[in-house]
Image: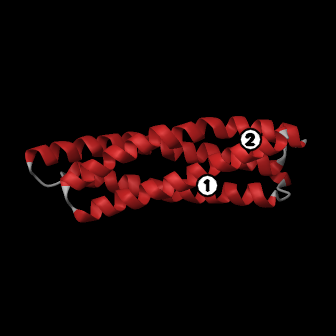
């Protein structure tokens, strides 16, 4: 029973990470494409909140449920597919953490522009494109982690 509870929680957490990431990206891009500071500010406020409520919670729980799940199932944490998953998870985090701060800054810039009744500033646009670029390696890493969790391939080069 413990195994199935841990697996359920781990799958839910992974789903939250993938779904929230994809949803945040979609809404941020859609708001940005309007070019309207009011819409960009409103969406960025929601996105920052969603990242703290959903993404951050899942980010903290995934290693816990994953480690407990591996131990319960009898996997060694040094198995290649687990090590590679952890490395990709850290890579994802290396892109996600700066993105959170970029989103907060974009929110602030968009709110200031909306209050002043002016267009989104150049600093907002620079941050947006950096944010956009950071999403690709992070999203690719998450997809690779999903594949590793499902396929559990023999990746002995990463075995410890």
Q: Is residue 140 visible?
A: yes
Q: Nearer the viewer, mark 2 or mark 1?
A: 2
For this view, does 133 lie left or right of residue 16? Answer: left
Judged from this view, the residue extending furthest toward the front is 1
Based on the displayed image, in which of its 4 quarters is residue 64 positioned?
A: top right
The coloring applied to the image is secondary structure
Residue 23: x and y, percent?
A: 46, 57
Dot 1: element:
helix
Which residue appears at 49% of the width and 58% of the height?
Answer: 22
Residue 153: x and y, percent?
A: 83, 59
Which residue appears at 55% of the width and 57% of the height?
Answer: 139
Q: Which residue is label 2 attached to?
A: 66
Numbered circles on residues, count: 2
Determine crowd level at label 2: few under 14, some 14-19, many 20+ residues with C-alpha closer than 10 A. Answer: many
Q: Are marks 2 and 1 in contact (CB under 8 Å)?
A: no
Q: Which residue is label 1 attached to?
A: 142
Residue 48: x and y, percent?
A: 38, 42
């Amino acid at each position: 029973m413990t195994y199935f509870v841990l697996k359920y929680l781990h799958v839910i957490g992974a789903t939250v990470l993938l779904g929230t990431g994809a949803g945040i990206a979609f809404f941020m891009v859609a708001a940005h494409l309007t070019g309207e500071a009011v819409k960009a500010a409103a969406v960025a406020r929601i996105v920052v909140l969603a990242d703290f409520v959903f993404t951050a919670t899942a980010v903290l729980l995934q290693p816990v449920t994953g480690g407990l799940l591996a131990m319960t199932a009898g996997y060694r944490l040094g198995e290649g597919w687990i090590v590679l998953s952890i490395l990709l998870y850290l890579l994802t985090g290396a892109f996600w953490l700066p993105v959170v701060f970029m989103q907060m800054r974009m929110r602030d810039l968009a709110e200031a522009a909306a209050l002043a009744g002016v267009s989104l500033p150049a600093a907002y646009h620079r941050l947006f494109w950096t944010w956009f670029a950071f999403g690709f390696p992070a999203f690719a890493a998450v997809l690779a982690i999903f594949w590793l969790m499902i396929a559990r391939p023999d990746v002995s080069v990463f075995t410890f």
